[in-house]
Amino acid sequence: MTTTATTDADLPQVHFWAVPDLTGLDFDPLLAKLLHEDPVTRVRLPHGEGHAWLVTRYEDVKFVSVDPRFSRQAVWGRSITRVAPHFIPMEGAVGFADPPDHTRMRRVVARAFSARALRALRDHAQDVMDRLLDRVEEHGPPADLMELVNRPFPLAMVSELMGVPEGDQPLMARWSDTIISAAAGREASEQAKADMGRYFTELVGRNHGTGKETLAAVLADAVDDETLTEHEAVGLAVLIQIGGAHAVRNNSANMVYALLTHPEHLARLRAEPALIPQAVDELLRYIPHRNAVGLSRIALEDVEVGGVTIPAGEPVYVSYLTANRDPAVFPEPERLDFDRGYNPHVAFGHGPHYCPGSALARIESEILVESLWTRFPNLRLAVPEDQLRWQRGALIRGPETLPVTW
């Protein structure tokens, strides 16, 4: 048996991915091109060193997400090409863990997202939303939904889950915005992460033996029974606080924008409110919720993906955005279709690193979409679409402001 050595000439070209600032609904042109023309390829991003592999087709994305030969833990300490100048998770956090450590940490978090806890959070979410919409009504038109609804709503919800007092929520918002932005710079982002880590070290420390059902108390109990180290507990708290506030804020704002600019879809939802959960799922599939890609993985051995061999030791990214636009799975993927019966989207990820807060994020999105137009049936943009400003240098996309009138 003879083997042929792989040379650089045999490998896909390396695409430099500048990652443009785009609106909440514009799909990245390079991602779209690669999905259809070069689905397992190599890219170089603005920060870090070297190149990484990018996997874009739905089945290939799912394969890489679950195969243990691709490791998140092996990423730490390497200067891998990436979007931001810094890593978002703390060292040792669940985002950088592999099973069985990852499984152990996820099991603890799952306690805070029990069916009973989610029912209580749904009731609390509706109360919070009603109070926020009271403020919008008192403010009068025009009003900025980002300031009055989309920013405070998910922040209040994840803080309630965590056990963060209301008075500390502005701190959480400031730290999260700095950590999650590619434009803030490495030093500022690392300082914010350290400050947030100290805060949660103290919060978890105050919750030992309280018997509360907040995530801080659940994490404290896990430290007490030695399921988690204190460092792991704090890393989990930071990651969930950031994701719960920042991701839902921007995703929900993009959902509102999508409905405001698709009047026929909005009219359908207002006529058929029972369709809202299905519509939210389709919006999750359709909206390119982030810029570029998240965390990479490292191939622990040579692995064939989509007919291409990824060599051992090389970093690999998956694109959940392109997976959600793969025509082999989603017919007419560029169309927003509330009648899409089969919708196995991967907006919350796939495999071991599937978002632990996905159920809460869905609850928040459904309540927001239904409550907004129940309270303000004539809600519409207060400025022309082309005058909306979108966040620049953001890892998760969203508008800077969302001015509306009614």
Image (cartoon, rainbow, N blue to C red):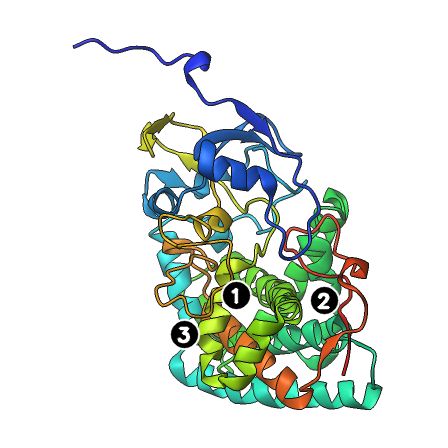
Q: CA distance from mark 2 to mark 3?
A: 25 Å
Q: Quadrant of the N terminus?
A: top left
Disc 2 marks which amino acid?
A: Ala
Sequence-first tag of 2 and 3: 3
Element type at marker 3? helix
The residue tagged 3 is 111
Image spot of residue 252 (x, y percent): 61, 69
Element type at marker 2? helix
Q: Quadrant of the C terminus?
A: bottom right
The residue tagged 2 is 173
Alpha-carbon neighbours of circle 3 within 10 Å: few (<14), some, or many (≥20)? some
Q: Nearer the viewer, residue 174 or 395?
A: 395
Q: Residue furthest left?
A: 1
Q: Mark 3 or mark 1, which is nearer to you? A: 1
The residue tagged 1 is 283
Residue 208 seen in the figure? no
Residue 363 seen in the figure? yes
Q: Quadrant of residue 365?
A: bottom right
Image spot of residue 146 (x, y percent): 74, 71
Which label is found at residue 23? none
Sequence-first tag of 2 and 1: 2
Image spot of residue 308 (x, y percent): 35, 28
Task: State the residue at coordinates (60%, 62%).
Answer: 247
